[in-house]
């Protein structure tokens, strides 16, 4: 749900530049209005997923250390 909302907000905020890119039909406006936002969104999502995976691994390691040290009952 959060991803859908983010995509809709990003698309709504850049709709005027997309229309301008379609109207002018020059390569630089198409790249800057359509390609770059999609590219940066994908990079941001990839970083977000990598950070979530890293945090989950760190939490699992902490849990394993506590179990090994006897701080947590099985």
Image: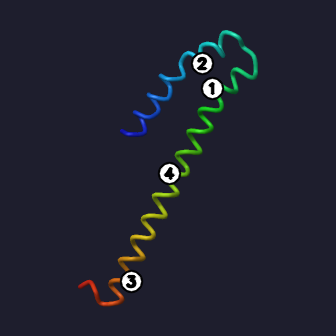
Question: Which colour style is shown?
Answer: rainbow
Q: Mark 2 vs mark 3: which is more N-terminal?
A: 2
Q: Quadrant of residue 29?
A: top right
Q: Residues within 10 Å of mark 1 (few under 14, many from 20)?
A: some
Residue 74 seen in this snapshot: no
Q: Is residue 71 depicted above or below 43 in this figure?
A: below
- Find out whether the residues at labels 2 and 3 contact each other: C-beta distance under 8 Å: no
Q: Residue under circle 2?
A: 18
* SS label for mark 4: helix
Q: Residues within 10 Å of mark 4 (few under 14, many from 20)?
A: few
Q: Quadrant of residue 25?
A: top right
* SS label for mark 1: helix
Q: Quadrant of residue 38?
A: top right
Q: Residue under circle 3?
A: 65
- Find out whether the residues at labels 1 and 2 contact each other: C-beta distance under 8 Å: yes
How far is mark 3 from mark 1, CA to CA?
47 Å
Residue 52 seen in this snapshot: yes
How far is mark 4 from mark 3, CA to CA?
26 Å
Q: Residue under circle 1?
A: 34
38 displayed left or right of 59 = right
Q: Mark 4 vs mark 3: which is more N-terminal?
A: 4
**Residue 64 position in % (x across, y down):** 38, 81
Q: Residue under circle 4?
A: 48
How far is mark 2 from mark 3, CA to CA?
52 Å
How far is mark 1 from mark 4, CA to CA?
22 Å
Q: Mark 1 vs mark 4: which is more N-terminal?
A: 1
């Amino acid at each position: 749900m959060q991803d859908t909302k983010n995509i809709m907000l990003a698309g709504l905020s850049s709709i005027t530049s997309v229309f301008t890119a379609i109207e002018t039909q020059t390569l630089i406006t198409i790249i800057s209005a359509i390609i770059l936002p999609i590219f940066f969104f994908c990079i941001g999502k990839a970083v977000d997923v990598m950070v979530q995976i890293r945090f989950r691994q760190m939490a699992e390691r902490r849990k394993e250390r506590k179990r090994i040290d006897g701080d947590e009952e099985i």
